[in-house]
Amino acid sequence: MNADASNLNPALLESEVKNFPTDSRNVKAGEVFFAFSQPEFKNNCFNGDFMDATKFVPKAFESGAIACVVRQDRYEEHKESLKKYTDRLIFSDDVIVAFQKLAHNVYLNWDKPVVAITGSAGKTTAKELTAHVLQSSGRKVLKTEKNFNNGLGHPMTVLKLVEDDSYEVAVLEMGMSTPNREIARLCEITPPDFAVELNVLPVHVEHLGSIENVAKAKAELVEGLKENGTAILNADDFRVAEMRNLHRGKNVIYGIENEADVKAENIEMKRFGETHFTLKTPSGEEEVIFQLSGKHNVLNALSAAAVGYSFGMSAKEIADALNTIKPPTQRGEILHFQEGFTVINDSYNSNPAALLKMVNTLKDGAKPENRTIVVAGEMLELGEDEKEIHRQTGRDLTETGIDCLIGVRGFAEDMVLAAIENEFDNRASFFPDSDSAGDYLAKEVKKDDLILVKGSRGVRTEKVIEKLVERYKVA
């Protein structure tokens, strides 16, 4: 485990441990606390300054921890308060790496299939859809909670197997934001049997430098496949399609526009939030009524269908599962209000490509009587060109045919100004925060309005939704 337990009380080696907290406030009796500190965070690609958890080790013992994992140099710094616990300390030169190796050993003992999912957009939605499809076949599925898809969240998910090893498959989201082979590291913890590649978009270019480097980082998932693993690839993204040659196993291709093993045809939005399409797989075809809007979500559904097909499910079994899907909170969640307007809550994350995709979804589902309004939060981590990227996005939004634009916080002001310069006149407004934008929208909203709220987590655009819910009733 990259650790030295030679000083540990031998009696502790016989202890059965079910949980491994990383927050001293959550420690309970019989658990092992991992005390992370700044050097580990830096070594493992986490940006920013983090608190040294070593100073909370005494508190963890007071809460009932039977042992704690600490760095040797951090121990020396806190020796006065820790020396009485020496026979209950496990020393490591990198506590995060020790945490990951523990998760890897747990995975090895479990030894069941892993479906790993990555992409520049849609990872969490695809993960939820995939888990739902596999669960519908009677399998017990372990899945990544929320967006815990990095070097800490990933092992936390895997360590749930210590308490319950009866899961039959794991669906794990894998993310990255730096050029430090983050996905490759996650694949070392749980080598995938199935690698799902959704898309490659210009996200995190601030850290990676170019979209080509983003593609290389995402390709680490396919390269990390087990020897006979299956790559599940999006035919409609040429950078993803090119990954078919990066491994020796099988490829299952899905798509809408291009030739694929798993396809969607006859796509039609009957009403906003209800997409009908024909699912085609090598085992047959079935009609699907899908409760998410937009071609990007149909692609997410196809990625889940491709996984289901790879697990031996029939087209009917997959279609039946997709028919029962409901949108996850804040990721394309559709709220119909009693007053006659509809809101698409996509407040979880945003980048230019994802924003424009959702706007196109909005327009595709709009009827002649709908006024289309886009509430767009500032987009984060766009690199040194973020001001111009926001301005170009503002210009692009005016070309989509929307009726109103509301920009929220920071560089969203440049988005609004560029829209106004592009003859959007009095149809674009800027607000410094989500609360004020929500107050404005709550006063201006009308019957038949179709509203997209799209923003990154840091902008908290969900507060715009909260303002509407305070004043109006969700049907």
Image (cartoon, rainbow, N blue to C red):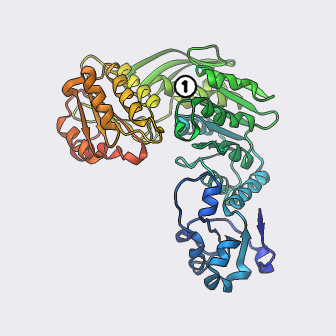
Q: Note whether residue 372 is visible.
A: no
- Residue 17 in the image: state x and y as whole percent: 70, 68
- Relative to 7, say whether 295 is above or below: above
In the rendered image of this protein, does residue 86 appear above or below residue 282? below
Farthest residue toward the front?
384
Residue 149 location, x and y as percent?
59, 47
Left or right: residue 475 compared with residue 147? left
**Which residue is painted at 22% across and 27% down in the image?**
427
Name which quarter of the figure residue 344 lies in: top left
- Give the side of residue 267 with respect to residue 7, left or right: left
Give the image quarter of residue 409: top left
Q: Residue at x 17, y 39 (%)?
A: 443
| Quadrant (top left, top right, bottom left, bottom right) of the C terminus | top left
Whole-percent x, y for residue 391 in the image: 36, 30
Q: Is residue 81 left or right of residue 378?
A: right
Density class for disc 1 (Cα within 10 Å; few <14, some 14-19, many ≥20) is many
Residue 338 is drawn in which quadrant?
A: top left
Count of labels in the image: 1
Looking at the image, which residue is at 26% across and 31% down? 341
- Numbered disc 1: secondary structure: helix
What is the x, y in percent for residue 336? 31, 34
Is residue 218 visible from the viewing direction of this image? yes
What residue does disc 1 label? 299
| Quarter of the image where the N terminus is located | bottom right
**Residue type at numbered disc 1:** Leu
